[in-house]
Image (cartoon, grey):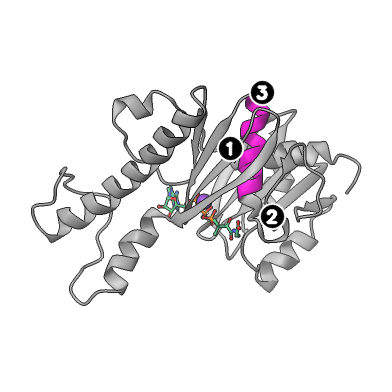
Amino acid sequence: MNLIIDIGNTMAKVALFNDGEMVEVLTESNQSLDCLKALCAKYPVNQGIVATVIDLNERVLADLAALPFPLLWLNHETPLPVVNLYETPETLGYDRMAAVVGANEQFPHRNILVIDAGTCITYEFIDSKGQYHGGNISPGMQMRFKALRQFTGRLPLVDTNGRKLPMGRDTETAIRAGVLKGMEYEISGYIESMKHKYPELLVFLTGGDEFSFDSSVKSIIFADRFLVLKGLNRILNYNNGRI
Ligand SMILES: Nc1ncnc2c1ncn2[C@@H]1O[C@H](COP(=O)(O)OP(=O)(O)O)[C@@H](O)[C@H]1O
Ligand SMILES: CC(C)(COP(=O)(O)O)[C@@H](O)C(=O)NCCC(=O)O
Ligand SMILES: [K+]
């Protein structure tokens, strides 16, 4: 079985895959991977992969180093089953690469937009020939809420739970609608403009943050919370024996 670890700027995601099937997944702090020992005792793990977009602390590094099977550390030199056209592959976030690999595995001959709504929202484009062209990075939901508080004198910290109006009627609803509608319109705008160029475009949405869309947009989105983990599993299998 494969142990898959995706360490993001907010959360670590850890999963076990058996022959392409995800059998267990856990989300936990990116400062401690406390679930590792128990997971590895529970399943017969043969190999693992780690992709991180943060510098790991000593404790996490030690826990990973102690794992009793080979571990592939995803980096810009890792062979991939897609072509990476990013001009600076050495600075590309591994979670972005993995999401693209996961989407391409499901639809290898399609043009795909991958949207990952986590700490940041990332937009990736991979074409029907399996070439990753790059994409965009914008602030994620929590970052937007926190930024409005941090960089103003009067705005409170608001979150997604509470009254949702199309147009705010007080400070709280104005911020909530501003952030959520802003993300929705941003995402819809990408989809619309890319569909104009690629009418057969497929759209994947992944990441920890879920939100609502109007039905016309929703109907063309594949929501797959585990796309990055699936992509990492594919990368690990692709590199089988090369660790
Ligand atoms: N169980 C959960 N624990 C923590 N965050 C969660 C959980 N469920 C949803 N979220 C949301 O998901 C976001 C993290 O998404 P994720 O894709 O894991 O980000 P990243 O990869 O940047 O760490 C959090 O900011 C939070 O809003
Ligand atoms: C863009 C990101 C911060 C997204 O991280 P996440 O929201 O998944 O925690 C991460 O992929 C990253 O640090 N990228 C490096 C820059 C780049 O991809 O070009
Ligand atoms: K992201």
Instruction: Give the residue type at disc 3.
Output: His
The residue labelled by disc 2 is 87
Distance of mark 3 from mark 1, alpha carbons?
Answer: 17 Å
Callout 1 amino acid: Leu
Q: Secondary structure at mark 2?
A: loop
- Mark before the other along the chain sequence, 1 or 2: 2
Residue 195 place in picture, x, y as percent? 46, 29
Identify the secondary structure beneath mark 1. Answer: helix
- Is disc 3 surrounded by few (<14), some (14 to 19) or many (20+) residues within 10 Å? few
Q: Indicate which disc residue 109 carries.
A: 3
Residue 88 shows in this picture: yes
Going 75% across and 48% down the picture, which residue do you hit? Answer: 49
Q: CA distance from mark 1 to mark 2?
A: 24 Å
Range covered by the magenta-colored residues: 96-108
Residue at (17%, 73%) from the top-left corner? 154
Mark 2 near mark 3, Cβ–Cβ under 8 Å? no
Say which residue label 1 marks: 227
Sequence-wise, the earlier of marks 2 and 3 is 2
